[in-house]
Image: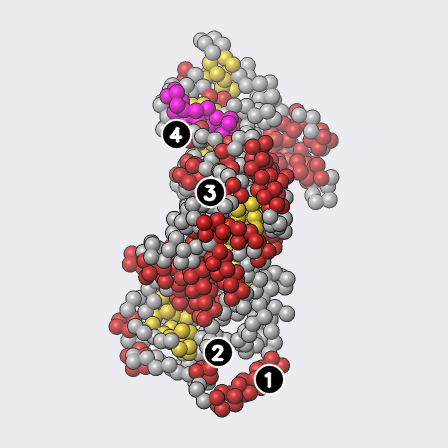
Amino acid sequence: MMPRMGYRLFRPCSWALRQRNSYFLVLLTLLVLITALYILSSLEMSPRTFSTHSTAKTLDAKTLEPPKTHQPKRKSTKTTPRRREDRVLFVASSNPYKETLKQSVSTLLQGHRLNVVVRWAKNVAEDPESLARYAAVIFEGSDLYSRYLKYVEGRSIGIVVFPNSNPLRRVASVEFLPKTNSAFIVKTTNSTALRILKANHKINLKSEIAPLKFISSKSDFELLANGLLSSGDYVPVAMAAKSVAFLGCTSMTSWFWKTLLLDVLYHVTSGALGFSLRRRILIDIDDIFVAPYGTKIKPDDVTAMINFQDRMRKRIPGFKFNLGFSANFYEKSSVDLEIEGDREIVKEAHHFWWFGHIFSHGQAHTYKSAEKLEEQMQKNLEFSKKHNISVGGTHYSVAPHHSGVYPVYPLLYDTWKSVWQIEVTTTEEYPHLRPDYKRRGFVYRGIKVLPRQTCTLYTKTYTFATYPGGKTRFHDTVRGELFNTILNTPISIFMTHVGNYGNDRLSLRLFEEAFGFIHAHTNLQLSTVPPKQLAEEYFRLFPKEATLPLWTNPCDDPRHKEIWATPVDCSQFPDFVVVGPQKTGTTALHSFLRLHPRIKSNANHPKHFEELQFFHSSDYEKGVEYYMSFFPRKNSGDVVSVFEKSATYFDSSVTPERMLQLLPKAKIIVILSDPGRRAYSWYQHQRAHNIEAALENSFSQVLKANRSCPSKACSLRERCLVPGLYAEHLERWLNYYDPSKIYLIDGNQLVDAPIEVMNSLQKYLGVPLVDYDTLIRYDEEKGFYCEARDVTRTKCLGTGKGRKYPELDDESSKYVASYYREPNNKLRELLTKRNWPIPNWLE
């Protein structure tokens, strides 16, 4: 059975252990045992949930198995945790001094994969009923809570309030909280207490809180199965409340307040916002033979590492170091004891896990041939066989300097699999090194890539005396960055280097203090398993990450640009993209844009011609270099803007996010024409290309196709109708791009008055203006505008463009008018709200 997963982060300590009289100690122990047996027989145990991206998921019983340690018990409850979307709303005031609180709370909750929505009070006032959509609401100020209480009260919504600063001075009472089912937490200089408010009981801060006295009567409290740390002692916590106020807390900078807030959110949402207590810990020691002479490990250091593992396993089941090696540096040192240290670690290899680096510790992306890279890995493999070092069991490797992992170097992944049978690797670089709480995993070419963490120990940090910031900074790291990483991350893989295990063994000192602190002050359960199992568990917890990475722009990250496999010319990235939809005039717009002497488009795709369709096709896996290869450089000075056009982007569910990550500065061009006529045009386009479903069915039959119809007809119906749901697709783009980056063109106007459209578009794009009256002209024979070759001749689009179709029949016309009536109304509302012009066809 899984352990109780109520957050219980603060660990209660037994006051009985501090009794000096052994007689009373024995009696108390017997009493505790009898009580525990009684509680065990009566308690109803139920698992807690771990929140992932958008829904709370129950952990698999085989995932993150708990250590066999005593866990505090909590009273059973008949309340079933609500299955509400795990979003938290932070209602912020306009007070600039509260910015620290907003940022620290948002960072904490985002680190736990909670979707945190920050809205200003003035925006909430426009739609206060929206408060009911959240699992919990955090109010910045008691006045905001009082103002919106009626919208959340009685709705099973967890409430947290951060009243105005310095409440002990400014607030005479806590009347802003309801007198039932509420609690307040008060922070003074040296103490913290939490108390539940009783019905019709007015709490006066001056008389009852200052000086603070802890009330430990069980009649006043429902125990949380944990305690709050205060002045070195732990006191009971009242958590029956649905509303909790943090008085005197103006930021979440302390480990204590961060942990407490997570506990509070769990309880005020009846477990809907839940987090597992269990944490996997893996410590990599990179470059076990690579360090400047005088800083490598010696035989005594190897013994210390083994002894450390033995001690840690008493608190962290399965704990074992994971050693990475570049065999070219074995036994290379000017210090005899360091050569002996290399031999000793190899002799004691069975105590550790091992994984291979590059033999010469080179950057993977600098090896331009498969043969050279394979040779490097084979040499490491031969070394491991010669010295009886087992590397096959971990199926794990890490590339030096993160080279080739992200940004990806396909050759590295392929060689890893062929030589080492690698299935797992790690990186700190995806999507970027900072902020660390946003690091994510991905899967590329069958290899699982896990997010890796730092712990303030780098390749040039070797001793306690030289630790950046000194002794104070070192201890702050334990309660700060390192504690936060473990608190926020269910699976932490720490990068360390061999230099910090020699000398005064700084790494061992840091982790011993950190793990001891966590054990003493929290109920987090630490354990260690091999990398392959870590990867399986990680992607069970976060299945949405088990996909290709989102390619980011290397020009926006100097670290990424430095480890890119080929030189990056940032001018090749498109400045704007025509995203569609299909059959609205995108091909005509593309041809007009290419007439501009300072605007260039991509080279033709071997399959899609002028369209790349990169962001939503299988080509996306080929990576950024493949995409860039289609675009010209601007270094000649003749080109001022580069663009691409793929009309299938507009209604693609994955394209907006992918495009934003790679082209965050790009402008998005959308053409909107009558959706009913667009649907009919697409049907006729399919007939012209001899598509079976279009040839065998009339347009009316396609529109009437339902789920029981042949799949090809259903698919054609979707492609006819779905792209015309303009408001729905525009909202998706607006989730990623600022409205100022999106430019709408009336498709009817593009047909009737393209010169006017192109002149306006030039101004929006900021390119040198050219007179399109001299570039395009109406062709009487074709019936639309074409490129003007000279005074008498034009060059029009191919024969497939400008086809004359039969008139749309009345039945189909009525159907599409009815189908798009509501979507068009939504489009009109959206355009009006954004102050975008209404297309003539929509008027």
Residue 290, compared with residue 511, is above or below; it is: above
Position of residue 291 measured from the top left corner of the image (x, y, whole percent): 44, 46
Secondary structure mostly seen in magenta is loop
Which mark is first along the chain, 2 or 3? Answer: 2
Position of residue 568 measured from the top left corner of the image (x, y, whole percent): 44, 31
Which mark is first along the chain, 4 or 2? Answer: 2
Q: Amino acid at mark 2?
A: Leu
Taking the image as drawn, is residue 204 in sight? no
* Residue at numbered disc 1: 38
**503 sits to left or right of 74:** left
Q: Amino acid at mark 4?
A: Leu
Q: Nearer the viewer, residue 248 or 277?
A: 277
- Residue displayed at 45% across by 17% down: 776
Taking the image as drawn, is residue 30 in sight? yes
Residue 420, compared with residue 784, is above or below; it is: below
Position of residue 266 measured from the top left corner of the image (x, y, whole percent): 49, 67
Q: Nearer the viewer, mark 4 or mark 1?
A: 1
Q: Nearer the viewer, mark 3 or mark 2?
A: 3
Position of residue 729 measured from the top left corner of the image (x, y, whole percent): 52, 41
- Residue displayed at 69% across by 29% down: 691
* Residue at numbered disc 3: 401
Which mark is first along the chain, 1 or 4? Answer: 1
Q: Amino acid at mark 1?
A: Tyr
Q: Quadrant of residue 582?
A: top right
Determine crowd level at label 3: few under 14, some 14-19, many 20+ residues with C-alpha closer than 10 A: some
* Residue at numbered disc 2: 223
Q: Amino acid at mark 3?
A: His
What's the CA distance linking mark 2 and mark 4?
63 Å
On residue 765, the disc is 4
**385 sits to left or right of 477:** right
Determine crowd level at label 2: few under 14, some 14-19, many 20+ residues with C-alpha closer than 10 A: some
